[in-house]
Image (spheres, helix red, strand yellow):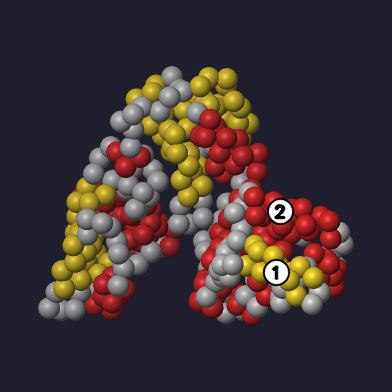
Amino acid sequence: MEKKDKAWKLRKIVEYIRTMDHPNSEALRNRFRIEEKVNISAVTIYRYINYLKDVEKAPIKADMNRLGSGYYLEDPNFWSDKVTLSPGELVGLGLLQSLMKVYKNTPVEKDLGSLFEKIRKYLPDGARYDESRIAQYIRVINDPMAVIDTTIFTSLIESVQEHKAISFNYMKNGALEPKKYCLHPYRILFHQTGDWYVHGCLADQTSQFRTFAFSRMTDIQNTGERFTIPVDYKLEKHLDPEVGVWHSDSYYTVKLLFHKDIAQHARERKWHHTERKTQNEDGSILVQFTTSQIYDLRRIVMGYGSKVTVLEPQELIEDIRKELSKMNLFYGVH
């Protein structure tokens, strides 16, 4: 938002009337000129004050002083509650801005940057935060992020919002060439690793649900077909967003035994809303929960190496055994 827009001027007028001693239109004009380097006539200020009183119901009153008629706020807190931030909230704002880095390479990055500029310009004098000072204490560490074509991102957001069917080419891991799909996109998913996905049903097989990664999609087109999301559709029926993003109709009871060396790590985390934790006498911790996300769970478990043992389900145990066998071939372990 530019400083010269009407909303900014209205808010500044209220701020000046609150902080100055019964300013008249001429005093307000001079304040704009000196502090903000903005030229605005006394007549325009008078018109804006009437707008504030009539439309925004601002409690602006006129009073006589030695300079003539001056303005004051009958309620000094008018609009102030919309912009006043505590020191902790200002730090939180800086933290949130640092966390915006996870939206890099998406259109959201630009929009969030614009939003923060608007928030900063609406903060009252004395409530500014030193972005560089806060940023030096914060570092966002994330997995390598996939680069997403902004046209893909924009097209998918629009298709989900307007219920428009899409066609696209998709390159699966391990595939030699892309395959074409037509999809009714229902939901956009953002994974903790920094990747974006779309979940929906195939246009020609509406009982078949799939999840597709934005970064693997090309040549996206609007087919011209509109669809209606079934009233009984729930994302949680098709995947477990607490663990992963991939579609699965099968749920498993998971039991993970965390070695005593990382027991505190297991203890302090919320793994799932169905979780149960059992402290063992040897210092290890058993974590149990239910999920459908075997693929993502394998990635999580193998990241702990020998410090976590999978007790259930058998499907996950076999999956990890196969993966370890392949790794043994690569690293010469027999």
- Residue 297 at x, y percent in the picture: 33, 54
In the image, what residue type sits under mark 2?
A: Asn
- Residue 173 at x, y percent in the picture: 49, 42
Q: Quadrant of residue 8?
A: bottom right
Q: CA distance from mark 2 to mark 1?
A: 15 Å
Q: Viewed as shown, does residue 216 lie left or right of 62? A: left
Which residue reaches farthest left?
281
Q: Residues within 10 Å of mark 1 (few under 14, many from 20)?
A: few
- Residue 22 at x, y percent in the picture: 72, 73
Judged from the image, the secondary structure of the residue bearing numbered disc 1 is: strand
Q: Nearer the viewer, residue 314 or 281?
A: 281
- Residue 233 at x, y percent in the picture: 34, 33
Residue beneath disc 1:
63
Q: Quadrant of residue 312?
A: bottom left
Residue at image coords 59%, 41% = 153
Judged from the image, the secondary structure of the residue bearing numbered disc 2 is: helix
In the picture shown, does residue 322 fall above or below 201? below
Residue at image coords 30%, 64% = 270
User: Can residue 222 be seen here?
Assistant: yes
Residue beneath disc 2:
50
> Which comes before the other along the chain, label 2 or label 1?
2
In the picture shown, does residue 142 fall above or below 161? below
